[in-house]
Amino acid sequence: MIAATPAQDPAQARPRLRLATVWLAGCSGCHMSFLDLDEFLFELAAAVDIVYSPVASDTKIYPEQVDVCLVEGAVANVDNLQLALTLRQRTALVISFGDCAISANVPGLRNLCSAPGRDSARTVLERGYLELADASGQLPFAPGIVPELLPKVLPLHEVIPVDLYLPGCPPSAERIRAAIAPLLVGQRPRIEGSSMLRFG
């Protein structure tokens, strides 16, 4: 006869984290670095439920009650803005994931293109779709299909409150692991020291 296994103490049972990753205006390099976690991805899979991610989920609607969200990219268009607002309402801990989310970085270079009387979005669109086009050039306009550009590209913290910053272009896999591993045991990561705070 097999002895009954004692029931696990509910106080010791840690619920699985609900993890999301989001890709706004960026190159996906931060998500590629996330995939470079290699064997740690197995540990992560055992401890979290990935509830929203461009690399691991087909879900189109950002879910409720997310514990942690890594947000890659700047806020450059109305879709980025709406997703940022939604994820902040539905997420306990929001992490600016990489230099584009923290400073707008390369997507933010559009901000330098503004001309007198015109915002950077209008200037860039006119240059790309009218001035450099053949005679059939026209500005893109397809509401619901092509998201409208914001007048200025913004870092994430200018749109929503951010709880943690993870710099790097992209952050290394080691840095990502150092930020995520403490969360798996209910601790807040410490992002400090040059190895964790260096940009680029």
Image (cartoon, helix red, strand yellow):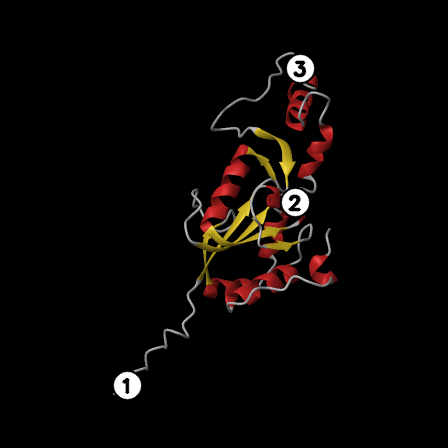
Of tags 2 and 1, the one toward the viewer is 2
Crowd class of label 1 (few under 14; some 14 to 19; many from 20; radius 10 Å):
few
- SS class, disc 1: loop
Q: Which residue is mark 3?
A: 134
Q: Which residue is mark 2?
A: 100
Horizontal and vertical percent for residue 40?
Answer: 56, 65
Is any part of residue 73 visible from this angle? Answer: no
Residue displayed at 69% across by 32% down: 110
Residue displayed at 51% across by 66% down: 184
- The kind of residue tagged 3 is Asp
- The kind of residue tagged 2 is Cys
Horizontal and vertical percent for residue 126?
Answer: 66, 20
In this rendering, the count of numbered labels is: 3
- Badge 2 or badge 3: first in the primary sequence: 2
Residue extending farthest top: 135
- The kind of residue tagged 1 is Ile
- Badge 3 or badge 1: first in the primary sequence: 1
Q: Are the residues flagged by discs 2 and 3 in contact, CB closer than 8 Å? A: no
In-front residue for pair 139/194: 194
* Badge number at residue 2: 1
